[in-house]
Amino acid sequence: MHFNPRALFATLALLPALVVGQLSSSVGPLTSHTTKSATKTCNVLNYGAVADKSTDLGPPLASAFAACKSGGTVVIPSGDYALATWVTLSGGSAWALQLDGIIYRTGTDGGNMIFIEHSTDFELFSSTSKGAVQGNGYVFHAAGSISGPRILRLYEVTDFSVHDIILVDSPSFHFSIDTCTNGEIYNMAIRGGNEGGLDGIDVWSTNIWVHDVMVTNKDECVTVKSPSKYILIENIYCNWSGGCAIGSLSTGTDISYVTYKNVYTWSSNQMMMIKSNGGNGTVSNVIFENFIGHGNAYSLNIDQYWSSETTQAGNGVQLSDITFTNWKGGEAAGATRGPIRVICADGAPCTGITISDFAMWTESGSTQWYACRSAYGSGFCLHSGSTHTSYAVSTTTVSTAPSGYSASRMAADLSTAFGTTASIPIPTIPTSFYPGATPYTRSDRAGGGGPEEHAEGPLGAG
Ligand SMILES: *[C@@H]1O[C@H](CO)[C@@H](O)[C@H](O)[C@H]1NC(C)=O
Ligand SMILES: *[C@@H]1O[C@H](CO)[C@@H](O)[C@H](O)[C@H]1NC(C)=O
């Protein structure tokens, strides 16, 4: 099950200047779930669960976990379950959680509906790609609250994967990956309400590969927070979302070696934002490669004076060695919100920013702008030179479309938001997450694939 990144390094070694963000070692569980299931299987139906959509799954799930947490597989078979009390599954090793049923939130506590911590060699998956958690967040949102529970949180989990499950309408965040190591997240659909505070995936961890994920909401799509190192995020479909981001950042920021690749963003707040307001520490060695945008407000947006964040202590987070390359498509209104906005902290000017092969054009009106402030590097309005002093925002307005801006669309972009007051239907997991890209591992690993399949994934998609 372990993905070995050596093959990936071998290919990417051809591009040494560009390749700075990468995985550091293998990701994923050490033991296949078929081996775990053969060792021991704990079906929640044998621990008091009833697939009647009203009996609380919480205590049976905790009991099944207690019986299978050392080397076995906990199975939630297909059927409809209610979750009235939240579960903390702590301290498992070489275990799996097979979610083939649908869990409906019925409880109203805050916190995390499913909290998995201090686990190693762990896999959360659906064998049918139909396992889901329906958070029924609209009940909170219709009443004006986003303070209900998060659906799923992993804390201090190592050598793990989460895949082929669907998370819907969380009252709060959908999925947080907190201080984890060597993880793989893939083949997921997340669909939340159309407002802020309902993040898709937030990761602050080390050596994590997130790929083939679709998010609908109006806040974070797949976002990296501090501290993080060696994060590879690819084939991401922000299908009406807030968009991807790094941040928000504060004091002591420590983020390095992050790559986002093949990110398709439709009808979102931005394609990629780095957001902070004051603070200190560093973000370095980051690549944003192969981005397509349509109908978004902002596109490339670095904002170190982000007005939605309270001003933090510090002169500003130092951003350095950040590359944006091969960005195509359009933005909603380029005269109001231009496609390039690099607003760096005067107290810590950005260095080594590269913007290349970037062609985007406004979808309404006839002009667009590029804006830079205290930002150094190459491309567009960035200043060059080795003396990095602060400078005021400088804006370049253009009235001619750049050549080669047109870009593919996904066949089925969401055309109307789901709102916040009605139940949100559970989607299926898409078969593609980026135009022309095939998911790395769609069917081959749901049944427990071997390491060679992992190694071939990144090579095959080149
Ligand atoms: C960051 O700011 C905090 C708060 O002002 C300060 O305590 C800390 O020393 C600063 N760190 C660095 C690396 O400057
Ligand atoms: C985008 O979201 C909409 C609404 O959920 C869905 O109908 C469409 O299939 C999604 N696109 C893809 C490619 O899955």
Image: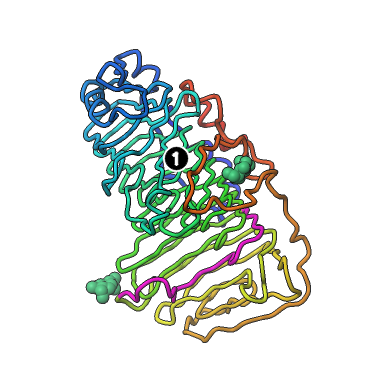
- Residue 386 screen position, x and y as percent: 51, 79
In which quadrant of the rendered image does the N terminus lie?
Answer: top left
Residue extent of the magenta highlight = 290-312
In which quadrant of the rendered image does the C terminus lie?
Answer: top right
Magenta residue check for 429: no
Q: Foreground: 335 or 150? A: 150
Could you tell me if residue 449 is visible in this image? no
- Residue 231 screen position, x and y as percent: 44, 49
Q: Is residue 126 above or below residue 341?
A: above
Q: What is the secondary structure assignment of the residue under circle 1? A: strand
Q: Foreground: 182 or 24? A: 182
**Looking at mark 1, is its residue's CB closer than 8 Å to ligand 2?**
no
- Residue 244 screen position, x and y as percent: 50, 56
Q: Which of the 4 image quarters holds residue 354? A: bottom right
User: How many tags in the picture?
Assistant: 1
- Residue 21 screen position, x and y as percent: 48, 52
Instruction: Name the residue at 50% across, 45% down.
Output: 191
Residue 349 lies left or right of residue 380; in this view the side is left
Instruction: Name the residue at 55% across, 83% down.
Output: 393
Q: Which of the 4 image quarters holds residue 105? A: top left
Residue wearing tag 1? 167
Q: Is residue 42 above or below residue 155?
A: above
Within the displayed image, which quadrant is ligand 1 positioned in? bottom left
Could you tell me if residue 87 is visible in this image? yes
Q: Foreground: 76 or 164? A: 76
Instruction: Name the residue at 32% across, 42% down.
Output: 154
Q: Amino acid at mark 1?
A: Leu
Kindly give the residue lying farthest to the bottom in the view shown.
392
Residue 376 lies left or right of residue 293; in this view the side is left
Q: Residues within 10 Å of mark 1 (few under 14, many from 20)?
A: many
